[in-house]
Image (cartoon, coloured by chain):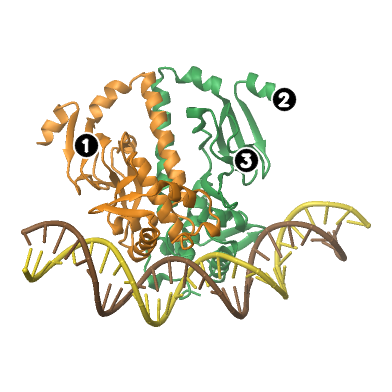
Chain colours: A green, B orange, C yellow, D brown
Amino acid sequence: ADFDQILEPIRRAVVPTGTILYSEGESANAVYTVRWGLVKLVKQSPDGAPRIVRLLGTGAAVGLEALKEGVYWHSAVAMRETALCRVPFGVLDRLQTGNAQMTDRLILQWARFMEYADRWITDLSTGPVKLRVQHLIALLLEITDSTTGEIEMPHVDDLAAILGTSAESVSRAMAELKRAKVLNRVAPRTYRCDLETLSRLTGLHSPSADFARIA
Amino acid sequence: ADFDQILEPIRRAVVPTGTILYSEGESANAVYTVRWGLVKLVKQSPDGAPRIVRLLGTGAAVGLEALKEGVYWHSAVAMRETALCRVPFGVLDRLQTGNAQMTDRLILQWARFMEYADRWITDLSTGPVKLRVQHLIALLLEITDSTTGEIEMPHVDDLAAILGTSAESVSRAMAELKRAKVLNRVAPRTYRCDLETLSRLTGLHSPSADFARIA
DNA sequence: CGCCCTGTTGATACGATTCAAATATCGTGG
DNA sequence: CCACGATATTTGAATCGTATCAACAGGGCG
């Protein structure tokens, strides 16, 4: 089965929730591209609590960091049904050599990565949990390019592992958003969110914009 | 003066503390390389409090993200006397086209960037402030490649802007480290740190490793 | 040498974590 | 299709850590 993967240049697949693309420390032989769906990169904290350091949605490249040392730095797990392209290193090497387009693509991926890395720090790791949850929802909507404003919510533990907080705190913040009708349940795990109000909340950090007032 | 910069292919310079290499939103025409010293990338938070999203030390490239849109994403400020190389975009373009080495360099820079981005999240943005400060000191030692274990401390406000906490909290944590003789003042703003104890503290997060016990 | 700025320390209030319990939800098999 | 058990989420109350404000000390610069 593994042989197949090495021989076959590029393989497309749709994988179910929870699929592990690769694990931290594993030696790497391919990168992936997300056609649609959502993938988390998890880093094991020394104290046991796993921390999610990145989310990868439509169009993102997964595992590029292994290009340097040939070892994956994180565990990559599908957070929902996800469509992937698997690109073995061999194929990349053939494309890479002296290819100007390759450089452009790298820069593009890098730029995306940096943008989200910055937001992860400024929006998701700083300030009161309430705000961080709001920012996270906005980010999820973007990454999964949900035009409708509907969103399939990840498990609370995942949200907590993204924000570096406790599951209970996330739950409380979400409960408040539901009460304020910013999140409206339309299906199991799926909510339609009031983009208007949300962007107003995330946009300006003024204390008066607190959603307790709206409720 | 600006003309000079565009005409001259690569210019070396040593700039004093506080020098602004470029500002957020400014249109870009060059990237920089740090020969030695320390540069901070600052992102202006909507609520006014500036957040430092990256530190760049010896060997790092500054402003590469502007390759994509031609606009700088952060403000870059020298945190101490720093030696730079200024590389105008024109020079880069000439090197870039179909150059395989260029790709390798990009990947190398990217890998470095990702490594620190991950640590910024896991080590500097999570957990009690005490630990975060310890991790930050370890990072500073690495980035400025201080082999001796001596370190020129940035201002408390900068440390706070890195950790996303208050200056007072940082001050308290540092005071504790000084009392525990992990930090020993050898000159104004300069401390020699007990690498042994520090790495023990940062390495394992066990509560018994708390430095209150050491003091 | 003295002033100003930076850093330190203390007291209080707020927010988050934690542990525990209750409730809701999901997947499964009858 | 419904009932059930297992899992996930919500809620409550007490504790702990951090932010905040204000006052103070100390070092560095003119």
* Mark 1 vs mark 2: in front: 1
Q: Position of residue B46 (x, y in %)?
A: 33, 59
Q: Mark 1 falls on what kind of element?
A: strand
Q: Is residue C28 left or right of residue B185?
A: right
Q: Position of residue B212 (x, y in %)?
A: 46, 63
How far is mark 2 from mark 3, CA to CA? 21 Å
Check disc 2: other Cα within 10 Å, few if <14, some if 14-19, many if 20+.
few
- Rendered image quadrant of residue D14: bottom right
List the residue tagged with mark 2.
A1
* Label 3 in the same subunit as label 1: no
Residue located at (11% from left, 31% from top): B4
Q: Which mark, by number, is residue A82?
A: 3
Subunit under mark 1: B
Check disc 3: other Cα within 10 Å, few if <14, some if 14-19, many if 20+.
many
Check disc 1: other Cα within 10 Å, few if <14, some if 14-19, many if 20+.
many
Three-letter code, disc 2:
Ala
**Measured along the vertical axis of the image, is residue A130 above or below residue B71?**
below
Q: Is residue A88 left or right of residue A214?
A: right
How far is mark 1 from mark 2, CA to CA? 53 Å
Three-letter code, disc 3:
Thr
